[in-house]
């Protein structure tokens, strides 16, 4: 079982995207709606928190692309007891169970769905950044209130990214 | 045992060994913290999606239910929650991840602490069942035939297993198998395939011995992984191992297919559907 890959997925989707970034985006929308007041968030959101998406997007795409190789049941042939099989057997058996898994779990569809949601979020982020260029003061919630729909759209896209990542099986499944 | 899981969706599910689980999104109902009297254990998600969690845990601890509580997180336990003196289950981000914990290892009459429960849930010692499932898949695909006239795979007795495995249409190409199939026609090579991973194949003698104490140990481990009271049948798995142990004849394709379906069900995978 590839725990390093699962750890990377957990750190991205659970720890950063859901628990930090989406939480911050939710707080930001509350601030724009006048439900909360937080001067520190108001000053730092656009300059420090929002741009975190740019690095995270690269990480998310990398995770999606690495999924197939890391979570295939073929990896089980590298650890006991199946690692005791001879190499030629591992070769045909590994390819067989990999192909079966690809069909059973619909791996290509899941990876495509994740990449599609990442791309959707990135496009929403681009529109938001463009809209922010027209804003007179990006350290003022008041000044950015007119961009609420762009912020809200980006948050919805990020939520879809989080849900798409949950389509990845949480463990290497043999059957 | 009745388990309440808070923060991983809603619904009810049966678990192995007669246990059951109820899922609730939040620890509050109509602004009041829910009563957990009827539950043996509560797995409470702790994170931004459940802001009520810390208050709920304190409330339950004050009522004397502290021994029932376990923390649940989709990642690793955040340092900011170290002060909660409860056992934690980490990396359980979805309802499925909770259901995939090793509930089968928790005895029917379990009466231990939350820490004891954690000890059972986090032991994923199903390596031998998983290996057997993979060996079954390889063996069944190797022996499957596609009937171009009827547009289906067979023989019929292994079709439910093939379908569950992912062999569903004529487009499935068996990789490298034509070469291997010729090699696998010899009985000792097939036996080596089944037995070598478990240390039951004696290379020098080109056979295994049914009297080898390793067989008894292997059967004991497989039985343990299966779980003593899962309620699921494993007659075909037993038959397959008996055939392999006997050394006289190989298990039939039907027995291997049925054994695969039993193991797949035990591993929590989708069931084989008879057609």
Image (tube, coloured by chain):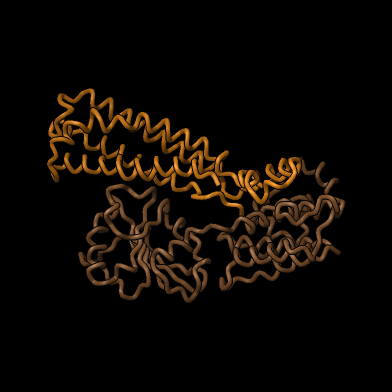
For the C terminus of chain B, give its image quadrant: bottom right
- Left or right, A107 with respect to B81, comes to right
The orange-coloured chain is labelled A
For the N terminus of chain B, give its image quadrant: bottom left
- Vertical placement of residue A45 versus B185, above or below: above
Q: Position of residue B260 (x, y in %)?
A: 68, 60
Quarter where residue B211 is shown: bottom right
- Vertical placement of residue B268 versus A73, above or below: below
Which of A173 and B170 lies nearest the eye of the viewer?
Answer: A173
Which color was chain B given? brown
From this viewpoint, which residue is outermost toward the front? B213
- Vertical placement of residue B157 versus A138, above or below: below
Residue at image coords 49%, 65%: B103
Quarter where residue A23 is shown: top left
Q: Position of residue A111 (x, y in %)?
A: 51, 40
Which of B15 and B62 lies nearest the eye of the viewer?
Answer: B62
Residue at image coords 24%, 71%: B63
- Left or right, B8 with respect to B51, comes to right
Residue at image coords 61%, 43%: A75
- Left or right, A127 with respect to B138, comes to left
Residue at image coords 52%, 66%: B105
Q: Position of residue B2 (x, y in %)?
A: 40, 72
Task: Judge whether residue B223 can be spotted in this image.
Answer: yes
Numbered-mark total:
0
Task: Judge whether residue A102 can be spotted in this image.
Answer: no
Q: Position of residue B84 (x, y in %)?
A: 28, 57
- Left or right, B263 with respect to A42, comes to right
């Amino acid at each position: 079982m590839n725990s390093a890959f699962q750890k990377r997925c957990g750190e991205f989707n659970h720890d950063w995207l859901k628990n930090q970034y989406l939480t911050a985006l939710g707080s930001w929308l509350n601030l724009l709606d006048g439900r909360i007041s937080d001067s520190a968030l108001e000053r730092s959101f656009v300059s420090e928190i929002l741009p975190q998406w740019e690095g995270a997007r690269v990480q998310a795409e990398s995770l999606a692309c690495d999924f197939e190789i890391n979570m295939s049941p073929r990896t089980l042939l590298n650890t006991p007891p199946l690692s005791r099989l001879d190499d030629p057997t591992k070769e045909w058996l590994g390819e067989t169970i990999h192909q079966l898994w690809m069909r059973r779990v619909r791996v290509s569809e899941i990876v495509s769905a994740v990449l599609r949601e990442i791309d959707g979020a990135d496009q929403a982020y681009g529109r938001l950044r463009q809209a922010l260029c027209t804003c007179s003061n990006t350290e003022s919630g008041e000044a950015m209130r007119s961009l609420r729909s762009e912020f809200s759209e980006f948050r919805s896209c990020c939520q879809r990214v989080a849900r798409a990542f949950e389509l990845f099986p949480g463990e290497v499944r043999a059957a | 045992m009745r388990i309440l899981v808070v923060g991983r969706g809603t619904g009810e599910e049966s678990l192995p060994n007669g246990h059951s689980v109820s899922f609730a999104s939040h620890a509050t109902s109509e602004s009041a913290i829910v009563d957990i009297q009827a539950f043996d254990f509560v797995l409470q998600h702790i994170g931004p999606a459940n802001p009520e969690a810390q208050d709920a845990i304190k409330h339950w601890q004050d009522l004397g239910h502290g021994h029932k509580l376990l923390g649940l997180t989709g990642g690793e336990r955040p340092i900011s929650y170290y002060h909660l003196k409860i056992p934690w289950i980490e990396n359980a981000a979805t309802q499925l991840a909770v259901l995939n914990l090793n509930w089968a290892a928790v005895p029917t009459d379990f009466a231990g602490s939350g820490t004891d429960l954690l000890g059972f849930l986090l032991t994923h010692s199903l390596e031998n069942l998983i290996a057997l499932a993979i060996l079954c898949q390889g063996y069944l695909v190797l022996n499957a035939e596609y009937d171009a006239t009827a547009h289906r795979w067979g023989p019929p007795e292994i079709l439910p297993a093939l379908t569950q495995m992912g062999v569903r249409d004529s487009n499935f190409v068996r990789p490298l198998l034509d070469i291997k199939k010729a090699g696998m026609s010899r009985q000792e090579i097939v036996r080596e395939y089944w037995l070598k991973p478990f240390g039951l194949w004696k290379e020098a003698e080109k056979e295994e011995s049914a009297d080898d104490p390793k067989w008894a140990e292997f059967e004991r481990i497989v039985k343990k992984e299966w779980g003593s009271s899962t309620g699921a049948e494993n007659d075909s798995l037993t038959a397959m191992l008996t055939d392999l142990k006997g050394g006289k004849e190989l298990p039939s394709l039907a027995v291997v297919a049925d054994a695969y379906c039993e193991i797949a069900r035990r591993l929590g995978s989708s069931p084989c559907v008879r057609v």
